[in-house]
């Protein structure tokens, strides 16, 4: 992936988490949505991008689950602000 592709992928991930609202979106559903939109993501790429977006403060886990594969993600106020500044919401 080119740097531009990665940026678009990250933008899409933040938009997906925002659209899910406070319920959040599971990693599996994020991955399926990205694949449907033409992003060839594997588990490693998804995990890396989720960690990156979390470190930026744009997304967060909805709540701690007993199983990591059941995590759900939502945007933070900073993530919402990023989307607003970009004119995406």
Image: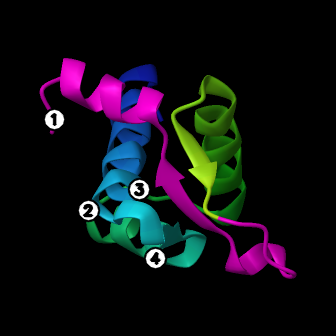
Q: CA distance from mark 1 to mark 4?
A: 20 Å
Q: Magenta span covers which residues?
A: 63-89
Q: CA distance from mark 3 to mark 2?
A: 15 Å
Q: Position of residue 41 (x, y in %)?
A: 52, 58
Q: Secondary structure at mark 3?
A: helix
The circle drawn on residue 2 is: none
Q: Which residue carries the number 4 mark?
A: 29
Q: Is residue 58 visible?
A: yes
The circle drawn on residue 17 is: 3
Q: CA distance from mark 2 to mark 4?
A: 12 Å
Q: CA distance from mark 1 to mark 3?
A: 13 Å
Q: Earlier in the sequence, mark 1 or mark 2?
A: 2
Residue furthest right in the image? 66
Q: Position of residue 73 (x, y in %)?
A: 55, 60
Q: Which residue carries the number 2 mark?
A: 37
Mark 3 against mark 4, which lies toward the viewer? Answer: 3
Q: Which residue carries the number 1 mark?
A: 88
Q: Position of residue 29 (x, y in %)?
A: 46, 76
In this picture, residue 43 sits left or right of residue 3: right
At horizontal 38% and vertical 67% (from top left) the residue drawn is 35
């Amino acid at each position: 992936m080119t740097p531009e592709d990665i940026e678009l992928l990250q933008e899409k991930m933040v938009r997906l988490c925002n659209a899910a609202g406070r319920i959040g979106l599971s990693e599996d559903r994020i991955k399926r949505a990205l694949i449907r939109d033409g992003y060839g993501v594997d588990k490693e790429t998804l995990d890396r991008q989720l960690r990156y977006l979390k470190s930026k403060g744009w997304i967060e886990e909805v709540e701690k689950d007993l199983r990591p594969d059941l995590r759900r993600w939502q945007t933070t106020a900073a993530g919402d602000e990023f989307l607003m500044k970009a004119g995406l919401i």
